[in-house]
Amino acid sequence: MSGTRGNGSTSLDSDLAGTGVGMSRPGLGSASLRADMASTGGDAGEDLEVDETGRLISAEKVIGTAVYNRGGETLGSIHGLMIDKTAGRVAYAVMSFGGFLSIGERYHPLPWGTLTYDTSRGGYVVDLNKEQLEGAPNYGRDDDVWSRPGYGQAVHDYYGIPYMM
């Protein structure tokens, strides 16, 4: 497998070229990545242009994915992802909600653990209705909420998810 470093970790930069995933993580087993890539018919020994496998998806492909509530009502779509740089995992999916033609649109950070992918809908499902979402922490295009002390804690408190950042 290309991209194996001297310490035995796998370089995702080399093995998932063009996916938008650009970090290497010690402890990611090459056998697991090979198996995942093999499930899509890819040859793990080549640099591949992939944006989705059985278990992995490029962040670029997540952007724009619909978000539904349990009743099947469309709430919005994924506008972006906030990634914890230290832990190397997605912390929030930022969902766009409301507005018309991007006027008055609000952005709602949803802790990643609140979303479940539904293959039959081809989108993410959350246990929220529009009224709950309207009362949730949110921000506008020009708001700098992430630098506010306690903002992440408030988001997690609203959704009843332990805050571990």
Image (spheres, rainbow, N blue to C red):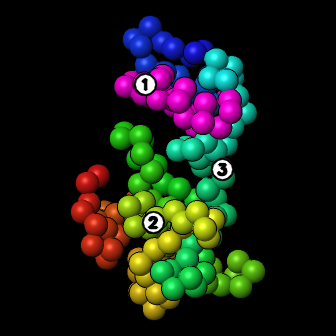
- First to last magenta residue range: 17-42
How crowded pointer 3 is (Cα within 10 Å; few <14, some 14-19, many 20+) is rated as few
**Of all residues shown, which one is farthest toward the bottom?**
131
Q: Amino acid at mark 2?
A: Leu
> In x, y percent, where is residue 76?
60, 76
Question: Considering the numbered disc 1 on the image, is that residue within a helix, a strand or a loop?
Answer: loop
> In x, y percent, where is residue 154?
30, 71
**Sequence-wise first label, 3 or 1:** 1
User: The N terminus lies in which quarter of the figure?
Assistant: top right
Q: With respect to residue 34, does 142 lie above or below?
A: below
Q: Residue at x 26, y 60 (%)?
A: 163
Q: Amino acid at mark 3?
A: Glu
Location of residue 19 by image quarter: top right
Q: Is residue 34 magenta?
A: yes
**Sequence-wise first label, 1 or 2:** 1
The residue where tag 2 is placed is 115
